[in-house]
Image (tube, coloured by chain):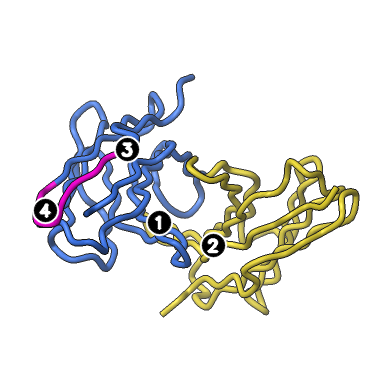
Chain colours: A yellow, B blue
Amino acid sequence: DQQVKQNSPSLSVQEGRISILNCDYTNSMFDYFLWYKKYPAEGPTFLISISSIKDKNEDGRFTVFLNKSAKHLSLHIVPSQPGDSAVYFCAAGGTYKYIFGTGTRLKVLA
Amino acid sequence: KAGVTQTPRYLIKTRGQQVTLSCSPISGHRSVSWYQQTPGQGLQFLFEYFSETQRNKGNFPGRFSGRQFSNSRSEMNVSTLELGDSALYLCASSSRSGGAGETQYFGPGTRLLVL
């Protein structure tokens, strides 16, 4: 039972354009969400978070949108840069643990 | 402030052996969570510790166990290793919660290969 889903295993975007990564969850009790970026052989690096009391949070080139009624969140990266190429994980927070999606591999083409 | 550290970084074991992995959280963080990452499976939650107490556990067999010490350092142990235990094991720390409302910060992981 996959409570957090990232349905696109991979995404390719041209440098300078917008990257949109999506994440769906099933449990309405989740109330805190995180996005991480991961390079091979390294631990995930925290990017941005959002609480369920908000529908948008921005940090530089990264914006996370939350649609609670649809149980959907998305990460927008604008403009995309080649260094953004990595695997992106979303995570949804429950009691004393986070549930992670399976990740989306983003490739930014120069 | 130093980040989360994990030792060893790489490990090769054979089936049937047991292994212990170590995690030192960020200074001041009291919650430590462990995850297993395998290709195509994302990060699977193993367990979470706070003040030496396990507060939550994922759906893993009893061969996977852990503990936390009074200085918040944590260890996880896998007994009777199986080939399927080959994975990247990640440790994450946070101040209090280990869950909703707090960001978790990850270590670099321990890559375990079971032959």
> How far is mark 3 from mark 4, CA to CA?
17 Å
Residue B37: mark: 1
| Alpha-carbon span between mark 1 and mark 3 | 14 Å
- Please state which amino acid type lies under the numbered disc 2: Asp
Q: Secondary structure at mark 3?
A: strand
Q: Which mark lies nearer to you, 1 or 3?
A: 3
The residue identified by callout 3 is B10
| Near-viewer residue (B27 or A108) | A108
Please determine whether, in this image, residue A73 is positioned above or below residue A76.
below
Q: Which residue is labeled 2 in the image?
A: A31
Prevailing SS of the magenta stretch: loop
Residues flagged by tags 2 and 3 on a common chain: no
Precedes in sequence: disc 3 or disc 4: 3
The residue depicted at 22 percent of the width and 54 percent of the height is: B115
How far apart are the alpha carbons under marks 2 and 3? 35 Å
Tell me, yes or no, whether the two marked residues, 1 and 3, touch with CB atoms within 8 Å. Answer: no
**Residue that appears at 55% across and 57% down:** A32
Report the residue at 56% width, 41% height from top. A45
Residue that mark 4 sits on: B79
